[in-house]
Image (cartoon, rainbow, N blue to C red):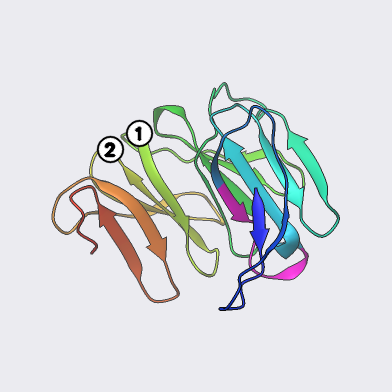
């Protein structure tokens, strides 16, 4: 895991750490505001994940999500307010973990397997794309599905990205709607 200072000229490396026997599949800053901006969630094809505090240089291993038997937590996303980490679980489940307690607080379910996750810009909802070709929107207050719609061109969604106004939907065909 490497950190760079982006200045547009040199983009020099600030620091880096090596995680033994842990090939990184996903890494993201824990929130975009508040005290969590120095923390990074790092996940792999393992049943545990790491939280790295880049200011303190402290690495914390978070063992499996209690109550679940996932063998892999390789894909995750974090809410912009730093409250939640969502992992793709087995059998269409989204595993939502509280960042303070490190405990599972919700497990909303899709009809198919989960392909991609993305929190809304204000962290009020999470979008998930499924193998059934649909996109689901869950509110973070109740974790209930409030909207479900199909990708515009009908193909399976590969990735999602949300801003304050738009949801970009990347299809396996290469088209972004």
Depth order, front residue of 87/13 = 13
Extreme-front residue of the structure? 10
User: Which disc is residue 144 wearing?
Assistant: none
Left or right of 124, for residue 14: right
Element at badge 1?
loop
Residue sitting at 57 percent across and 21 percent down?
A: 69
Circle 1: is it few (<14), some (14-19), or many (20+) Cα within 10 Å?
some
Element at badge 2?
loop
Residue pointed to by mark 1: 113
Residue pointed to by mark 2: 131
Residue sitting at 42 percent across and 65 percent down?
A: 162
**22 versus 170 height, above or below:** above
**Residue 122 seen:** yes
Extreme-right residue of the structure? 56
Residue 107, given in percent of the width and then of the height, sits at 52, 38
Left or right of 70, for residue 50: right
Dot 1 or dot 2, earlier in sequence = 1
**Residue 30 seen:** no
Q: Quadrant of the C terminus?
A: bottom left
Residue 30, given in percent of the width and then of the height, sits at 66, 57
Residue sitting at 50 percent across and 69 percent down?
A: 121
Circle 2: is it few (<14), some (14-19), or many (20+) Cα within 10 Å?
some
Residue 107 within the magenta-colored segment of the rendering: no
Mark 1–mark 2 distance (CA, rounded to whole Å):
5 Å
Depth order, front residue of 168/22 = 22
Please report the bounds of the magenta region as a residue range.
Answer: 27-35
């Amino acid at each position: 895991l490497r950190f760079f200072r982006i200045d547009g000229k040199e983009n020099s490396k600030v620091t880096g750490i090596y995680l033994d026997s842990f090939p990184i599949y996903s890494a993201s800053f824990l929130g975009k505001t508040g005290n969590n901006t120095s923390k990074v969630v790092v996940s792999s094809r393992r049943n545990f994940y790491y939280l790295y505090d880049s200011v303190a240089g402290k690495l914390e291993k978070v063992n499996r999500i209690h109550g679940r038997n996932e063998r892999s937590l390789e894909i995750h996303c974090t809410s912009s307010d730093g409250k939640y980490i969502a992992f793709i679980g087995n059998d269409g489940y989204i595993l939502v973990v509280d960042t303070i307690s490190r405990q599972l607080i919700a497990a909303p379910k899709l009809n198919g397997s989960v392909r991609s996750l993305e929190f809304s810009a204000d962290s009020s909802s999470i979008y998930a794309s499924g193998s059934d070709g649909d996109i689901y929107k869950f509110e973070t207050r109740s974790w209930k599905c409030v909207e479900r719609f199909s990708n515009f061109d009908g193909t399976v969604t590969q990735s999602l990205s949300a801003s304050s106004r738009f949801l970009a939907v990347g299809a396996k065909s290469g088209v972004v709607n």
